[in-house]
Image (spheres, rainbow, N blue to C red):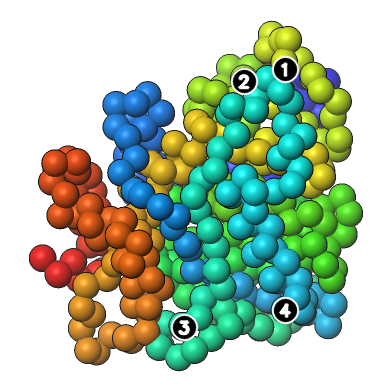
Amino acid sequence: MTENFPAPRRDLCGAMHVHRRLLNESMTYRAQRARIESRALQYETGRRSSVRRGVVTLPVVVHVVHNTPEQNIDDAQIHSQIDVLNRDFRAANPDVSRVPEVWRTLIADNEVEFALATVDPLGDPTDGIIRAATDRTSFDVDDGVKAAATGGSDPWPTDQYLNVWVCRLGGGLLGYAQFPGGPPPTDGVVILHTAFGTTGTATAPYDGGRTATHEIGHWLDLFHIWGDDDGACSNDDRVADTPNQADSNVGKPAFPHVTCDNGPNGDMFMNYMDYVDDDSMFMFTQGQRERINACLEGARASFLVARQAAPAKEPAAAVAPAQAQAEDGDVERLLHDSERLTKEVLADIQNMLGLVGHETGK
Ligand SMILES: [Zn+2]
């Protein structure tokens, strides 16, 4: 593999494939992406700053879609994955100490945590884990795993739960994600069962739970750190504090690895949004955190905003995850903080609630 002439090679992650397909297929997605990108740019350039305060905990539902007993991973493996996410997104992972000195000040605590859902959409207690047997021996980036009708498992409301499907993926894929702004029925991330968590079927070198960290990074609007330009150095990840780099890094690179005239420090290959082995990636940056904030206060604001009194005909229980957020204040308070919240932000949030069919209580 050379830096400037991409050789055919497997993609470990299918997120950009899905992104490009949706851009081609859907005018709605294109419009949503333009709006989301505009907001991200405003956060990135400091023209707008994050208004959320405190840690947000995202309710997670894990769909284990299995064709063999081995693929039906146990609860411990799932819990090990949640633990990794909670360390990685808070910069509480022990290996963050391996970040090169030159980038120490860029390490970001995103103030995002994850918890398996405790209440299902019908209001019943749940452990946040769904197990679905399938006839399909493997899945692809075609989203088949995301619907029972195609051998997968139907999502829970994707504006209230982060849906994670765990299954066998073909083509050497470790996982894929749908960026914010995509169709709600397929929103979420898909992870290969042997690249999920740190126990059970998790297999080296992808047994550190970092595939889910990477894919949820996409779900929160982060691009690959090399900008997906196949080594051209012409496109970057739209984050200012990550060096422009030519192409993905794999394996366990040695620091520094210089490409695109980005010396002396070179590629930030230890970033979660590169392709290196799980034990070689251990940081998000402040700039990436700004994109995540823009996403959480924009396209994914439903995870911050408490649902107002839900109509009786609706499942009462779906309210619970959002109510948990309300206790932290967050957007519920912001909705009434006109000094800090511009009309545009307010309109965005209300628009988002309208898009997902929520009562705003207004
Ligand atoms: Zn990716």
326 on left or right of 254: left
Q: Marks 3 and 2, how far apart in space?
A: 42 Å
Please report whichever mark, 3 or 4, sits nearer to the chain's N-terminal start.
4
The residue drawn where x is 72% and y is 79% is 75
The residue drawn where x is 41% and y is 43% is 293
Circles 3 and 2: CB atoms closer than 8 Å: no
Q: Does the residue labelled 3 lie within 8 Å of ligand 1?
A: no
Q: In which quarter of the image is the N terminus?
A: top right
Q: Is mark 4 within 8 Å of ligand 1?
A: no
Q: In which quarter of the image is residue 44?
A: top left
Circles 2 and 1: CB atoms closer than 8 Å: yes
Q: Quadrant of residue 42?
A: top left
> Looking at the rendered structure, which numbered label has been put on residue 120?
3
Which residue in the structure is indicated by mark 2? 243
Regarding mark 4 in the picture, which secondary structure is present there?
A: helix
Of 246 and 256, nearer the camera is: 256
Regarding mark 1 in the picture, which secondary structure is present there?
A: loop
Please report whichever mark, 3 or 2, sits nearer to the chain's N-terminal start.
3
Please report whichever mark, 2 or 4, sits nearer to the chain's N-terminal start.
4
Res 105 seen here: yes
Please report whichever mark, 3 or 1, sits nearer to the chain's N-terminal start.
3
Q: Position of residue 77 (x, y in %)?
A: 76, 71
Which residue in the structure is indicated by mark 4? 75
Q: Marks 3 and 4, how far apart in space?
A: 17 Å
Q: Marks 3 and 1, how far apart in space?
A: 46 Å
Amino acid, disc 2: Pro
Amino acid, disc 1: Gly
Q: Where is residue 201 in the image (x, y as percent from the top left)?
A: 85, 68
